[in-house]
Image (cartoon, helix red, strand yellow):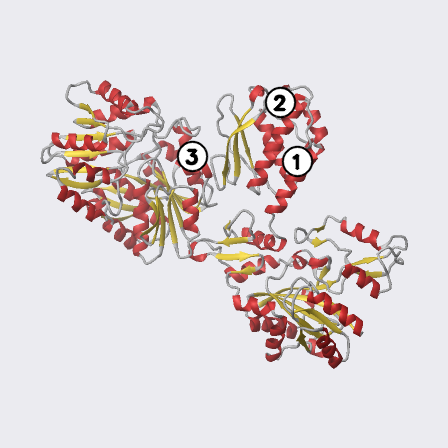
């Protein structure tokens, strides 16, 4: 029997596709290594069970994962989930691995569909029974639970066409965020974040609505509110004509009865209305047709003639049969799930039939039209015909004024008149209701006439042509991500923008930390993009987040890929540098404006060939004569590079010197070459995002990488004349860069206090030891995070590597405790020496290590970084 080992929902661009998809690793059990095409009769039995699969046949050599992918997608589709196409990238599979990657609309539905697919294949292989119909029925229920209302869906579809990003606030709610940061808007059904609460309250009180409209000089029917049937009869007698009776604050036509002319009809209608509200409106029945006009912002977006639910006789069928036939239409569904709503044969329908001289089992003459409701709401089975082009200018202005009088930005104005093409005053027509959260199915999908994109009209009123996006810069790479992210954010914040930033230290808004921890993944980025005050976001985007959830954004303005080197290999199915480059490339490919790449890194340079046309490529380089850089500039491209210690921004043959590298505190007077490279990348990203040169210079020249502003990134402390550098370094490239920097600082020896996380491969840990032995005069190995290894094993492997590279006695020491390792190393140092403390998880490790011998200095450092 097949079982699921691991399942992840990749909610944004990811390693496998540019669109969301579900990744599942399946244990095939006894089917391991079996090709579906080799199982006799499997395809025939499968297509017999699910005829819609007849067009599918496993590709030659297609494995079990391919079959399960297709089956899970098909089951979702059959359940009514709109998936769309998923263009997958070729990603290596391990031998024997059964990996399923399929698209989805709803996560819950996709997971259930794959579980059903596993049961189906197991049953077919083992010749056992499986109830596919029951499984599909359960899937359909899940789709219904997760479904988005038709009106909301129309608005969301319009937003997608405009490129506006969407965030569903919960898995089942119809509440959405459109746009990001300070440009975001909220939407629930057709209620927007701009919809006034008081206006909604007014609209729900039909009497108050009518009073305000009347005061504004707008046409409304006379009437009054009542709470007793006696008062209802009194008001009806005063009006002296047919009346409409309806609840004060119901919606969707609930409890409404029209054309009440007799005392008995008034009594019955009053009782029906009281089922929905204590207070009831009795008002003059306006003769004519029922029209709905949609107002969005300052314009009329659409208008429809709404017809009550009805059937047309054929001389043979009963009303019951005609209704059943009409309800069988694919256009009709339950509630708001479809274009039209099914017609109910309830007591209201029976009473309406009775008024016309029929009953539910009566045969209707051919051609005769029988109504089944007094009101024409689509939610009770009505239909609609578009009449937008018929509205006179005076009626348009009346509707816009009515919406403004109530205070609604989106409103449904209900009008009754004989002919909507004529001015209302000329025919005694009037407004009977103003609706907040109006349904727009009738306008999007009219039964007759021209469809109107009401959803787009609502989006236009919300965004006025904007795509709702804030500038977004995403930074990835093996080393330097945090420092580069902070440099970019710092420079942007100095221009007056409210910035948002995610890093390994937390989430920051305008320089203040709002969330603590490693925040380089999907959820942290999403929380930042949801913050209503952020004008620009800079997102450190790490490997783990990409692999576990995908990106939190569909695209960014500028992406930065700093480098690709050996780290985290052997984790999450990524075993080689080429595969790691594919992960980092997800960020590069998401750029819509520009990509910043490292000219020195062949894997970064290789990404340039797969960047979308129209997206600018900028290189950064420490070498002004690098061949990749020169070729790019010769082609008219832009780049940032170092020339004669100056940071230069170039475009083709044009050169602009920004500042001296030594003027950047992060460069540590130019000796921290890796931080100079990070600054070049930051300058390129800022230039690509449209920042002026003076803003770039101001940012680079004022950012300090200390324990307060950039903890664990080359933080420098003077401990009794020994220069101590604390850094997060935990891989070969980082330790090599730190040793190079230390050589430029040291007047004496260099001591490295080093470690690495235990989840690295044995060979990687040994190699770290070799690099450290080559770069430092003395190496002290300690144990940081064992991550599943026995205590001491990580340190032992690093020591083995260091000993193999430098067997000289006295150069290698091991102290498993970090505090003891630091104290031991400091005792070997003299003033003028440099001590590198790598793989630090917190500055408190250094503070607590020196506290016993230097309590005052420990307190001073604590205060400085607070």
Choose top left, top right, bottom left or bottom right for residue 107: top right
Crowd rating for badge 2 (residues with CA inside 10 Å; few <14, some 14–19, many 20+)? many
Q: Residue at x 51, y 59 (%)?
A: 465
Location of the N terminus (image quadrant): top right
Instruction: Give the answer, above or below, for where 386 lies relative to 282.
Output: above
Discs 3/2, front: 2
Specify the farthest residue to the left.
Answer: 831
Closer-to-camera residue (790/520): 790
Residue contact at pointers 2 and 1, CB within 8 angstroms: no
Of the numbered discs 3 and 1, the one sitting upstream in the chain is 1
Classify mark 3: helix, strand or loop. Answer: helix
Specify the farthest residue to the bottom.
Answer: 238
Marks 3/2: CA–CA distance: 30 Å
Marks 3/1: CA–CA distance: 36 Å
Residue 775: x, y in percent?
A: 21, 28
Residue 403's disc number? none
Residue 36's disc number? 2
Discs 3/1, front: 1
Residue contact at pointers 3 and 2, CB within 8 angstroms: no
Q: Which residue is drawn at 29% across and 35% down?
A: 626
Marks 2/1: CA–CA distance: 22 Å
The residue that disc 1 covers is: 135
The residue that disc 3 covers is: 583
Classify mark 2: helix, strand or loop. Answer: helix
């Amino acid at each position: 029997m097949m079982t699921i080992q691991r399942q992840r929902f990749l909610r944004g661009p990811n390693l496998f596709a540019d669109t969301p998809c579900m990744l599942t690793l399946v244990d095939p059990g006894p089917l391991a290594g079996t090709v579906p095409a080799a199982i006799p009769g499997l395809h025939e039995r499968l297509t017999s069970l699910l005829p819609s699969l007849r067009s599918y046949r496993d590709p030659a050599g297609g494995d079990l994962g391919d079959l399960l992918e297709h089956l899970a997608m098909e089951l979702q589709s059959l359940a009514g989930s709109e998936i769309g196409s998923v263009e997958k990238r070729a990603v290596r599979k391990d031998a024997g691995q059964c990996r399923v990657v399929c698209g989805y609309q709803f996560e819950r539905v996709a997971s259930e569909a794959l579980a059903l697919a596993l049961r189906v294949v197991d049953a077919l292989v083992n010749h056992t029974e499986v109830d596919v119909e029951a499984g599909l029925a359960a899937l359909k229920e899940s789709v219904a639970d997760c479904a988005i209302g038709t009106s909301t869906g129309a608005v969301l579809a319009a937003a997608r066409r405009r490129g506006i990003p969407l965030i569903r606030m919960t898995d089942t709610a119809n509440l959405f965020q459109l746009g990001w940061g300070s440009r975001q808007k909220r939407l629930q059904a057709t209620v927007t974040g701009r919809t006034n609460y008081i206006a909604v309250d007014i609209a729900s009180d039909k009497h108050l609505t009518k009073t305000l409209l009347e005061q504004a000089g707008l046409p409304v029917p006379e009437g009054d509110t009542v709470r007793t049937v006696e008062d209802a009869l009194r008001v009806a007698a005063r009006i002296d004509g047919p009346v409409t009776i309806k609840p004060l604050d119901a919606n969707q036509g609930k409890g409404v009865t029209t054309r009440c002319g007799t005392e008995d009809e008034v009594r019955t209608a009053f009782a029906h209305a009281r089922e929905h509200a204590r207070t009831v409106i009795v008002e003059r029945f306006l003769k004519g047709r029922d029209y709905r006009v949609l107002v969005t912002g300052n314009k009329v977006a659409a208008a429809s003639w709404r017809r009550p639910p009805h059937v047309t006789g054929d001389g043979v069928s009963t009303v019951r049969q005609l209704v059943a036939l009409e309800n069988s239409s694919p256009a009709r569904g339950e509630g708001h799930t479809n274009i039209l709503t099914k017609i109910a044969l309830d007591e209201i329908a029976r009473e309406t039939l009775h008024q016309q001289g029929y009953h539910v089992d009566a045969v209707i003459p051919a051609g005769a039209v029988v109504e089944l409701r007094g009101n024409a709401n689509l939610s009770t089975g009505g239909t609609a015909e578009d009449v937008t082009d018929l509205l006179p200018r005076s009626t348009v202005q009346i509707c816009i004024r009515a919406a403004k009088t109530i205070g609604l930005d989106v409103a449904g104005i209900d009008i009754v008149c004989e002919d909507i093409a004529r001015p209302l005053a000329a025919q005694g027509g009037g407004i009977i209701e103003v609706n907040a959260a109006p349904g727009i199915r009738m306008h999007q999908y009219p039964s007759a006439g021209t469809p109107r994109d009401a959803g787009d009209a609502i989006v236009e009123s919300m965004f006025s042509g904007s795509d709702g996006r804030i500038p977004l810069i995403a930074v990835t790479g093996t080393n330097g991500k945090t420092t580069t992210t902070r440099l970019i954010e710092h420079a942007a914040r100095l221009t007056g923008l409210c910035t948002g930033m995610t890093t390994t230290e937390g989430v920051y808004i305008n320089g203040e930390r709002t969330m603590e921890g490693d925040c380089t993944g999907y959820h942290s980025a999403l929380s930042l993009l949801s913050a209503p005050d952020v004008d620009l976001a800079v997102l450190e985007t790490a490997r783990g987040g990409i692999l576990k959830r995908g990106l939190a954004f569909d695209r960014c303005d500028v992406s930065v890929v700093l480098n690709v080197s050996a780290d985290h290999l052997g984790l999450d199915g990524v075993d080689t540098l080429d595969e790691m480059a594919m992960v980092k490339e997800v960020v590069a490919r998401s750029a819509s404006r520009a990509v910043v790449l490292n000219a020195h890194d062949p894997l970064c340079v290789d990404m340039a060939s797969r960047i979308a046309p129209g997206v600018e490529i900028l290189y950064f380089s420490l070498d002004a004569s690098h061949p990749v850089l020169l070729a790019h500039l010769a082609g008219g491209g832009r780049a940032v590079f170092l020339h004669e210690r100056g940071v230069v921004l170039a475009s083709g043959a044009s050169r602009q010197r920004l500042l001296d590298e030594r003027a950047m505190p992060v460069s540590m007077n130019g000796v921290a070459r890796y931080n100079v490279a990070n600054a070049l990348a930051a300058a390129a990203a800022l230039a690509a995002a449209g920042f002026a040169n003076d803003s770039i210079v101001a940012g680079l020249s004022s950012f300090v990488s200390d324990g307060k502003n950039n903890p664990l990134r080359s933080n420098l402390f003077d401990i009794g004349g020994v220069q101590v550098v604390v850094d997060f370094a935990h891989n070969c490239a980082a330790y090599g860069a730190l040793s190079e920097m230390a050589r430029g600082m040291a007047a004496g020896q260099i001591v490295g206090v080093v470690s690495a996380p235990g989840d690295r491969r044995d060979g990687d840990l040994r190699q770290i030891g070799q690099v450290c032995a080559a770069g430092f005069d003395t190496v002290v190995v300690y144990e940081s995070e064992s991550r599943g290894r026995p205590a001491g094993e990580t340190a032992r492997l690093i020591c083995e590597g260091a000993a193999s590279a430098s067997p000289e006695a006295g150069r290698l020491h091991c102290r498993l405790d970090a505090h003891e390792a630091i104290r031991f190393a400091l005792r070997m140092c003299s003033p003028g020496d440099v001590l590198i403390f790598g793989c630090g998880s917190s500055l408190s490790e250094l503070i607590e290590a020196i506290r016993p011998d230097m309590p005052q200095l420990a307190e001073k450092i604590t205060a400085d970084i607070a």
